[in-house]
Amino acid sequence: MEENREELMEILEDTRPELDFENETALIDDQLLDSFDIISIVSEINDTFDISINVNDLLPENFNSVDAILALIKKLQEE
Amino acid sequence: MAFFSWQFILFLTVSLAVYYIVPGRFRWLVLLASSSWYYVVGGGLKSCVYVLVTVITIYLGAVIIDNMQRKVDEQLKGRSTEAGTVKLSREEKKQLKALGQKKKKRVLVLVLLINFGILIVLKYGFFLSTNLNGLLERFHTSGRLPEVSFLIPLGLSFYTFQTMGYLIDVYRGKYSAERNILRLCLFTTYFPSVLQGPINRFDDLAKQLYEPHSFDDLQFREGLLRMLWGIFKKMIIAERAAIIVNEVFGNFEASRYAGFTLVVGILLYSVQLYCDFAGGMDIVFGASQMFGIHLRENFRQPYMARSVSEFWQRWHISLGNWMKDYVFYPIALSKPFAKMQKTLKKNVNPYFGKVFPSFLASFMVFVLVGIWHGANWKFVYYGLYQATFVSTETLFEKPYADLRRICRVREEAAGWKLFQMIRTLTILSIGRYVDVVPDMPTVIRALKATFSTFNPYIFFDGSLYTLGVDERNFGILILMILLIAAVDVINERGQTVRGIIARQQFPFRWVVYLAAIAAVLVFGMYGPGFNMSSFIYAQF
């Protein structure tokens, strides 16, 4: 899990270095990430974790915080 | 029924009175009755047939999809045998889910095809049949399609998009299907927004529609004020600007306008479009707020955008969000796009691979947005033009940033921000030529005429006052535009002028209301051909 977190943080910080991902809990609700960011983050996550996040998973609650994204990754890895 | 007519005022007053008089649990039925009445009177019975087809198909589609999902969920819990429930293996679960998904998809596609089909045939039938006939002619075949044109039901694009969004959300499992068809009917035809949007989302609006709202003095006042503000924008600003725009561009082939006259014309067209559309929205939101129902905002000070993509996040927000959720994401995350992304990352350049799929998907979205504006090739070009700016912003993000560093731009300086706003407005204004003249060759001619003549003297020799609006009215127009700009600046800082006024003491409030009504009556433009119902966006 810790490993996942580190890899995810790397992807996120690579996309938007100026955001404080550790403490943000409303990445989507506050429109901190735009649609282009989401696409690039999702594609990186899919490659890195070998999962496939599809359009049905693109709910704000799955992407609002690092923990939420981690939970989504975990859920998809288990499926 | 025009928004600014005594019939509408009477209709709204009666609806509001009945809404607040009847017991709470019947209130949504009052909204349904009002919406149905509004739709029948405004659109005629033929329109109702189309809207009913949509309500019934979407209702059934959503319920069937929901039932299928429930069944799968039930089966996933395990197989019941005599010895009790047996858990399914991971493989079995996977298969079951895939099968359920496939069945759900069939229903979704069928219902979307029916509703999209109706939209395309009604709205684009003429465009498609003439273009196909052109093609047939080119291949020297003798067969021709009949050139069809239909009556377009009231609010067709808006209610179709709204209900399709609902169905797709149910399919995606975002929420369950609505089991009461009358409630879905109210969501589809809710009268303040059926004519010109916004494109509402079920999870935002539905609950608000069905729950009873008690009369709230402050909400009512704010709603009323917002309606007045919308009427003010439409009647005093948009209608005045329209006169000049029509004079300058209305018959462009025959006129000899050039240089700064065209610049003034196109800038006033931007003003007209904003005040017409956002003013219409203010009336919609205000009317809705009087019932205690809050719609999601459709505009956020669009002309303060510092880039074209930011403009599209501030202008007609509900359409942009719809396109993002139901077109952009599905395309950008589709399998072919994921494959393309991988190939590009590996063979071309990692950064390019990362942004190219979004770039391509946004092109597709903007072409669609263009076509949404009208069945005409010029709107396809319009979409491509917008997409070029939006997508290159991301594609060239790094070189742009380097350029700013080399030029030592201070990004937070007010001067730089202002420059960005003016730059965005210029790009948008050039794009709007497509909207004001009939076809592409004329667009090119108009652009040439704008840039090939240098005539700054028109600002001093009084020729601006010969465009259909005299000096006094031109002055009023400029003053009112400044007022709108000031209000937008205040809104941008996070305050609403409306809220501030509505909270004032009784006498002050009434001075503002009466001043606004007086301004509309005195300064509003009502020519003989005036028609308050002709909002530009109601055509879409």
Image: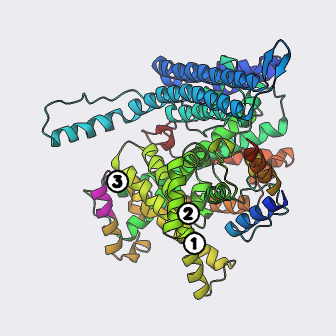
Q: Is residue B116 left or right of residue A70?
A: left
Q: Magenta segment, principal secondary structure?
A: helix
Label disc, if present, on residue B110 of the rendered structure = none
Residue behind mark 3: B437
User: What amino acid type is highlighted by mark number 2?
Assistant: Val
Question: How many neighbours does mark 3 have within 10 angstroms: few (below 14), some (14-19), or many (20 or more)?
Answer: many
Label disc, if present, on residue B397 of the rendered structure = 1
Q: Is residue B98 left or right of residue B122?
A: right
User: What amino acid type is highlighted by mark number 1?
Assistant: Glu
The answer to whether residue B442 is magenta is: yes
Give the residue at the far top of this rendering: B82
CA gap, disc 1 and disc 3: 34 Å
Residue B268 x %, y %: 48, 59
Residue B487 x %, y %: 69, 58
Residue behind mark 2: B355
Span shown in magenta: B438-446
Between B494 and A72, the one nearer to me in the picture: A72
CA gap, disc 2 and disc 1: 10 Å
The answer to whether residue B228 is magenta is: no
Earlier in the chain: of badge 2 and badge 3, it is: 2
Report if residue B133 is visible in the image.
yes
Identify the element where label 1 is drawn.
helix
